[in-house]
Image (cartoon, rainbow, N blue to C red):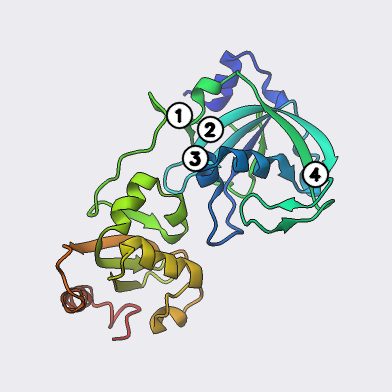
Amino acid sequence: MLTFGTVLNLAGIDRGTVRLLRHQDNRHSGFPTPYALWRDRRDLFEAYQATQSFANETKLRATYWASFVGVPERETLFVGLYAARLLGPLPADRQHPITGGIEPAGSCNVYQLDQVALLSEYAGRLWIDWGDSYRSWIQRGDGKEKPVVELRRTLGEPPFPGFAAFIANLSDIESLPSTWRTPLSATRGIYLLTCPKTREQYVGMASGTDGFIGRWREYFATGHGGNVGLKSRDPSDYQIAILETVGSTATIADLGDLERRWKDKLQSREMGLNRN
């Protein structure tokens, strides 16, 4: 079995000198994920991972950091090997790389991170199975093996799967490739939300100018999108899927008819979260 540890061995890197870091920050709802930053704003991603809490100082002591980003539903992506050196507490206030708010001086540690040439050819192409311990986002390179699940020939995003095959979580919306967001923003239709906690379904329609993406962003921002049934539940990271799309000539009345038909088919009023 090929593992990330095997890759380190082949590169002549002592596993004990490496810490594996899996960046997937769910604390900042409505803002880009670390994966989206790495993909679209590499400078902000570098700034994000260069600051770490004081509590993690001991865990992060190593010659190298092997950085990964969590990509929901698509395992864990290797994005680079860095030579790491602790500089000390943050010397001055700065903008937080994700939220844009103020990160106060002295609130965290700053590290000097220099990406090294070793393993650079695998950045953005090598995917591993991190395992079930997602909360343990800092792990030793000589610890539990991380199987390599895919090594792509080229760096790039997977193609848009099509509306019928599209499935994602609300928390994934801002991390979707731009080649996916474009058709989802330009298309209207009927969608399905499924609560992972209660297994209840909700049928809705996307009728605005920003199509499916615009409507889903409302749910992501508020947790309920203004719907009575969803307001009655604790906020959840709903799974989203597309039931039917419509052409540009479809009216709001047409969409309303389709929405009612799908509610009847799925019985989402009787056994779901729809209330009308």
- Report which residue position mark 1 lands on: 125
Three-letter amino acid code at the position of disc 1: Arg
Indicate the position of residue 195 as horizontal and vertical percent values: 40, 68
Disc 2 marks which residue?
78
Answer with the quarter of the image where residue 137 lies.
Answer: top right
Name the amino acid type tagged 2: Phe
Pinpoint residue 252: horizontal percent, then vertical percent: 21, 76
Q: Nearer the viewer, residue 131 or 170?
A: 170
Other residues around mark 1 within 10 Å, as few (<14) / some (14–19) / many (≥20): some
Front residue of 137 and 113: 113
Q: Is residue 196 visible?
A: no
Identify the amino acid type marked 3.
Arg
Give me the C-alpha separation between circle 3 and circle 4: 24 Å
Residue wearing tag 4: 109
Q: Nearer the viewer, mark 3 or mark 1?
A: 3
Which element is circle 1 on?
Answer: loop
Q: Secondary structure at mark 4?
A: strand
Instruction: Determine crowd level at label 3: few under 14, some 14-19, many 20+ residues with C-alpha closer than 10 A.
Output: some
